[in-house]
Image (tube, rainbow, N blue to C red):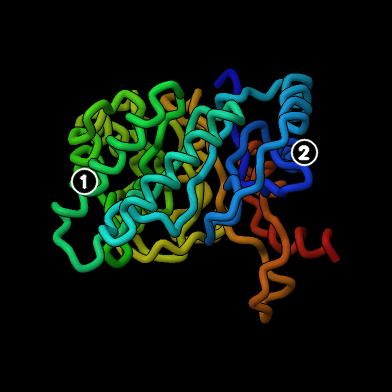
Amino acid sequence: MDKLYIGSHVSFNKDKQLLGCVEETLSYGGNCFMFYTGAPQNTRRNSINDELTLKAYQLMKEKGMELDKVIVHSPYIVNLCNEANFDFSVSFLTQEVERCNELGIRYMVLHPGSSVNMERSRASYNISKGLSYILDDTKSSNVMILLETMAGKGNEMGKCFEEIRDIIDSVNDNSRLGVCMDTCHLWDAGYDIRDFDGVLDCFDRVIGIDRLKCIHINDSKNVMGSHKDRHENIGFGYIGYDVLRDIVFNERLRDIPKILETPYVTRDDNSKERLYAPYKWEIEMLKSKVFDGDMIKKMRGYYE
């Protein structure tokens, strides 16, 4: 593999915005990243500071980072399935696409939605209709919306490739739609990613490998097919280090950014408060291709 594109979720705050994202990524040893343009649990957003954006571009150029390997994640609270809030969801996601365009970001990840109190076919129709409106209203942009593969928890849509395909196929102009895989979600949904080439072959048959633009790298706290969606640190869950390392270095994914979304680590085994970002250690461990069972212990020692 000529170049490994690996990074993590980072913070986009009002003081440093995109520049802060780049600096945090570099501190972890990454070369790509994902961020929310504001808090994921609400829709309040600060204006984009062009000066900070230009400084971020300059630093990225100096460090050999590529803007088309940067991902925005839309907030969780938006649900295109929900008919009561449909117009709001369409309006807000349209604004998010415009913010991505303003920042120069090409890809925005979206959880498809949740089919509460409705048939899944109706929920799928609502998602496709909403995406059609959003993409039509942002025709001057080249921002792609990436539907994320989901674990199937509760009424989540997108728990299988066929559901995502049906949403994409029903959008008027789907040229700016893609997919973001999540290893934890795939595993929890029942895909045996220990044979990841087999999963990619299935994806290619159902959706088309050309639509895959990003992959979230996470271990899982649960057995395959659990439909739980609980991320675990790399190598400390049911998927295991070797499987995730092989996915990261899979030649078919060489140009795709790999983004870690693993949980922060607690101060000790008896604590529930997650304090320490694991990404520096996990990125180093993946690059080394050797599992370190003492990673969490070393991390706690470093921060203490």
203 displayed left or right of 251: left
The residue shown at (71%, 21%) is 64
Residue 211 versus residue 16: which sits nearer the camera?
16
Residue situated in front as seen by the camera: 142 or 292? 142
Quadrant in which the C terminus is drawn: bottom right
Pick whichever, 58 or 2, lies toward us: 58
Residue 16's place in the image compared with 227, above or below, is: above
The location of residue 132, given as percent across then percent down, is: 28, 35
Q: Quadrant of the N terminus?
A: top right
For the question of whether residue 221 can be seen, the reply is: yes
Q: Are marks 1 and 2 in contact (CB under 8 Å)?
A: no
- Position of residue 209 in the picture relative to residue 69 (left or right): left
**Residue 163's mark?**
1
Q: Of label 1 and label 2, which has the lower sequence position?
A: 2
Give the crowd class for mark 2: few <14, some 14-19, many >=20 residues within 10 Å.
Answer: some
Q: Residue at x 54, y 29 (%)?
A: 101
Q: Position of residue 228 (x, y in %)?
A: 37, 66
Q: What numbered label is drawn on residue 61?
A: none
Q: In terms of image quadrants, where is residue 50?
A: top right
For badge 2, the amino acid type reads Glu
Q: Which residue is mark 2?
A: 23
- Total residue callouts: 2
